[in-house]
Image (cartoon, grey):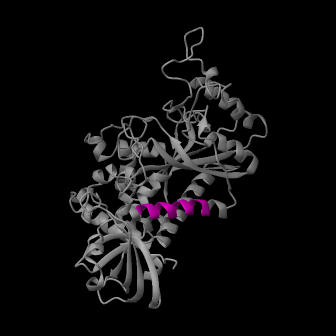
Amino acid sequence: MRHTKVKDLLNSTTTLQEINAKGWVRTFRNNQFIALNDGSTINNIQCVVDFENTPDETLKRITTGAAVSVTGSLVESKGAGQKYEIQVNKLEILGDSDAEKFPMQPKKHSLEFLRENAHLRVRTNAFGAIMRVRSVLSFAVHSYFQQKGFVYVNTPIVTGADAEGAGEMFQVTSLPLDNLPKTEEGNIDYKKDFFGKHTNLTVSGQLEGETFAMALGQIYTFGPTFRAENSNTSRHLAEFWMIEPEVAFNDLNDNMDLAEDFIKYVVKYAVDHCGDDLKFLEGRLIEEEKSKPQADRSEMPLLEKLGFVMNNDFKRVSYTEAVDILRDSTPNKKKKFQYIINEWGADLQSEHERYLVEKHFKCPVILFDYPANIKAFYMRLNEDGKTVRAMDILFPGIGEIVGGSQREERFDVLVEKMKALGIDEEELWWYLDTRRFGSAVHSGFGLGFERLVLFVTGMTNIRDVIPFPRTPQNAEF
């Protein structure tokens, strides 16, 4: 008999005579009641075992974590909390789980303990919910862009280009590290490497994406990116997923409109399709915050916060105005900020971004027109000669969630900027070709997918919203 998902059984509109369900035991009590979960929903289904007619050896094998198959009738539940339960006629143990050794016992575990058992943590309610929400958000990303007529482009993971100019990249090589070939000058001879040149894991698909936008009009990438930053924080990963649309003929205002519309769409999609999981995560967050001082707690419950983002316009503020606000703010005057804002041109830190969003405007904020010298070379220079057409979207609890810009479409200006930053024109000859042949105004942005999942689930550490986090000194699993 083909098994039926727990979610479908719980959503049934009628009792059923003969069904089969398979899943993992969450709890087994009184030698009679199995709480069974198969990952299709946050909710378990209760399976009532006829313990008097079930061999003791079988009952002893019904332990937390064991995989079982139950066959029986779907009947109205006598207990509170669920409409239906399974009256078990036949039970089969598919895979034993040693109760003494299984780490995911039915009790509260610390997030740090769960990270150390990332291969099993998805069997807990919280991580099952997070990963289902992540999956739905991923689908929503594709759904939004496909409905808008964007072309999905797979940009390379191995690349010779550093899109950010940051230099913090993972090198890719097939050269023997204990016997590196050298040139006559004593440098590493990359001509003998697999690709015949120095290559890295990509930090962004943007530059390649731009080339496709200048032919297909509007494209998006959605794939893994890598940063070799030695940054052990709750907001950084060495491997993460990026969503990067690029649109020909869009200026900065169009870009801000697109980013805001996109975020509202995917958040609403998650709210509409992940009700049970988000309700559970909201309750989890409320419990977690009870131990925090009142000032550190969220001002809104999770679902209300998501509704607030969906239903309100994002506040658009120039960098110059933001610096004035921060300079005059109480935490800046009282030197409560770790990085004091004294003058125009400062690179805003997470504490400043969160102050603007959470304390000053109390809504998502789009900052635009940043100083040119703190932004990447490809951003369009404004007429004032000192700012660029860049924009960042700042969210409560997260800080920056989106970074984007109108790209510098003028060949001469772009070349001058590259020279000033010491970026090799020959390395990016193909990128400059898009300015030589049919250049046009175009814009795009990048959204770190894990930060989006972080916001929607209410989690506070980015390591808890990706299946297997990659961080400094950690490539386990």
Residue 426, quarter of the rendered image: top right
Q: Position of residue 431 (x, y in %)?
A: 69, 35
Residue 356 lies left or right of residue 311; in this view the side is left
Query: Is residue 42 in sight in this rendering?
Result: no
Residue 476, quarter of the rendered image: top left
Q: Residue at x 34, y 80 (%)?
A: 46
User: Residue 2 or 296: which is nearer the viewer?
Assistant: 2
Q: Position of residue 121 (x, y in %)?
A: 35, 57
Q: Position of residue 44 (x, y in %)?
A: 36, 75
Q: Position of residue 458 (x, y in %)?
A: 37, 60
315 in relation to 76, above or below: above
Query: Is residue 422 in sight in this rendering?
Result: yes
Is residue 317 shown in magenta? Answer: no
User: Residue 180 or 379: which is nearer the viewer?
Assistant: 180
Range of magenta residues:
130-143
Residue 117 lies left or right of residue 215; in this view the side is left
Q: Residue at x 60, y 60 (%)?
A: 142
120 in relation to 76, above or below: above
299 in relation to 407, above or below: below
Residue 120 lies left or right of residue 257; in this view the side is left
Q: Residue at x 22, y 63 (%)?
A: 290
Magenta region, mostly helix, strand or loop?
helix
Residue 124 lies left or right of residue 316; in this view the side is left
Residue 420, quarter of the rendered image: top right
- Residue farthest top in this picture: 184
71 in relation to 63, above or below: below
